[in-house]
Image: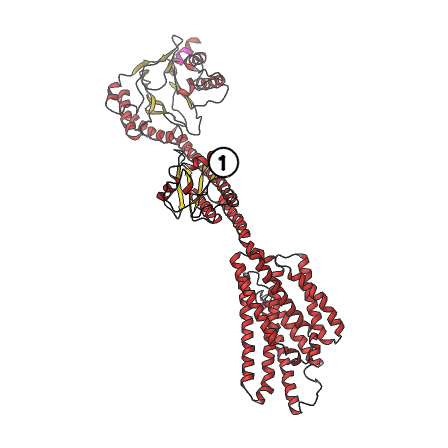
Amino acid sequence: MGPGPVPPQRFSPLLQPRLINAFLLVFALLFWLALLGFHVAESMFTSVFDESVPVDPIWVGGLGYRLVMAGFFVFSTLLVGRLFGHIEKLHVTTVLWRLFITGMAGITLIMLITFVNRATSSWAMHKYLGPVFFALGFLAFTLFFLACVFIFRRFILYPRTKRKIVAWQIFFGMLALGVAFLFFRDGLAITIAYFPFVLLTLFLGANVRWIAYLNFNQKLRTMGLLVMILLVMVTYVIAARNLPGQLGVTPGQSWYLVFLVYVVIFSLTYTVISILVLFFNLPTSSIFEAESFEIASASKISQAIQSNLDFTDIMNTLLEASILAANARAGWVEMLDSETGKAEVKVGKRLGNHEVEQILQGQDLTEKVLRDGKPFLVRNLRKHRAFQAGDTRYRSLVVVPVRSNNQGFGAVFVVNELVNAFEDVTLKSLMTFAEQAGIALENARLIRESIEVERYREQLKIANEVQDQLLPGSLPGDARIEMAAENENAYEVGGDYYDVVQPSPDTYRIAIGDVSGKGTTAAFYMAEIKGIFHALALLDLDVPDFIRTANQALSQCMQKGFFLTMTYLQVDLAQRRVDMIRAGHCPTFLYRAGSREVQRLDDGIPGLGIVRNRRYDQMVGEPVRLQVAPDDFLVLYTDGITEARDQAGEEFGYDRLQEVIFRNRAESAAMIASEVVSSVKNFAHAELHDDYTVLVIKFLPEPSSQASVEVSRS
């Protein structure tokens, strides 16, 4: 297949405006060269005749000449309008400076032409180069005042309103009318047209709201530039005093050059009005600047509310804004320590801690302003009893509380070398800044807490996943033994632990314990406990040696203050024997099927990790040895079961647990564990507030004996 159709060529969005500008420039230059040609031809024509003989203006001043001049005005206006129509991004002073440089370039050209004309006595120079010099001066004059018009247009339309835009369109229409008047010699109509133009010029000249957005220094620079531009305008007007005659208009008809007169009147009027408004605004600029600065500073601190979590950055922003707003020399910010509650200097500017001590003289002003809820002002430190002993160059002091929602954070201190340096309006500004900073600090604190909570939740989630892997997913068993467990954490991660290891078919090593503390620390200690338990359970250690070795290991890996309560059992199914030691853990309940009674086994020693030396080895005695029969079972649990409370504050206790065990003696191990938990929850009438674990170990009849019984019954 051949290539597809070639898309039509289009101008680039950046290239098209340049082409338009080039088009306008070419035509403006062509019309200017045509004007120059008319003047050169007129000069050559008049040189043939005696200058005293009147000659009709067949060249300069004729219809063709006026058509060319109209074309020059139109294309020059469009060109300058495009060149100066997109200066919104430039500052006022930058635009005016460029206008002044442009005007000075034209003045320099005119002065050079004047100097050359006066310095030479050549007749040919005056007759042939004179028109060239005049045309250059006329070009500079026209372009400069058109530039003034379009630059002032930017000022007038700031900010834009529909009324201003309509007024400017009418003004532009009157400029077009001024061009049209080149072809009419009705003096009355031209004179009448000046009145609405002057009124419109005054209306547009009153639009100087852009001045309000300048600060004092900018207003001063702008006024200076406008004064220099006004001098350039006056120089142009003086230099162009012979312009009407040179353009073929008699002195009595000079007002027929309506377009140029409109442009000059508008430029001069707007320049003079702007200078006067700037001059009378200078005395009040400092007040408006102070208010603008307050708004800007409040906005800056508000941004800190939304984006900044750093207390130091917020305090630095507050201090800088306060010093500038109060026109002060120095200052500092004191914040309350979260642990001690005492005020401490956190940030300072232009003074050190020693000078702060000299100013305060031991006074706790932060606590005072936070308590009073209002600023504290000292107009003269030398005359105040509490501060006159201080050796400092500062004379005035103001302290403003920083607080939010009745919570105090600290205070901002501002000092000045002058007496009575702080006015009421200054105090209001400082209070505004301090309130914004208080909100910022409160916001930062809440976000920090939220982040910490989220981080803690993430840690708990990880620890919970770890704990799920630490506890056995299922318990071993066979036809001779049945085990079941119920476990739940009051928090996302608890400290309860249980595990079972079966090193041989007839042997089970079982542990249940409770780590002191909750959360991630307890979870990670559980990981260490699991490792120790599995390592020791696979060794051929009797119960006392297991407890001694486990205590030594845990004493080395657990921090002081943490310990583990544990009940450890070794079950020998071949001999139907259980060896057990209770190390600080809850008593174990044993149900005897033969006697139909529930026994509580209380004997025990301290928990692991409490005594961390050899004395603990001596505390470990012989284990409790139990001979178990079919349908006997053990109930092991953690303190979350017996210490559960009802609404009256009464504990579930051992007696109720013993009753539940006896009532469910005929049930399976899983049912017994489930009934214990249900009974405790029904007693508490709510979810339990502590971790709980229940582990039931039930011994079953031998399969062979079950078979013989079944045969005998048959």
Image position of 196 with respect to 250: above or below = above
Instruction: Pinpoint residue 583: horizontal percent, then vertical percent.
Output: 32, 20
Instruction: Pinpoint residue 222: horizontal percent, then vertical percent.
Output: 54, 62
Quarter of the figure that contains the C terminus = top left
Residue at the spot of label 1: 373
Residue 252 in view? yes
Image position of 337 with respect to 574: above or below = below
| Residue 150 or residue 394, whichever sits in front | 394
Instruction: Pinpoint residue 270: horizontal percent, then vertical percent.
Output: 62, 64
Residue 405 falls within the magenta-colored stretch = no
Quadrant of the image occupied by residue 199: bottom right
Q: Residue furthest top?
A: 595
| Residue 52 or residue 72, whichever sits in front | 52
Quadrant of the image occupied by residue 558: top left
The residues colored magenta run: 706-710
Query: Would you say the magenta stretch is mainly helix, strand or loop?
Result: helix
- The local crowd at label 1, few if under 14, some if 14 to 19, many if 20 or more residues have their Cα within 10 Å, is some
Image position of 675 with respect to 147: above or below = above
At mark 1, the secondary structure is loop
Quarter of the figure that contains the N terminus = bottom right
Image position of 356 with respect to 75: above or below = above
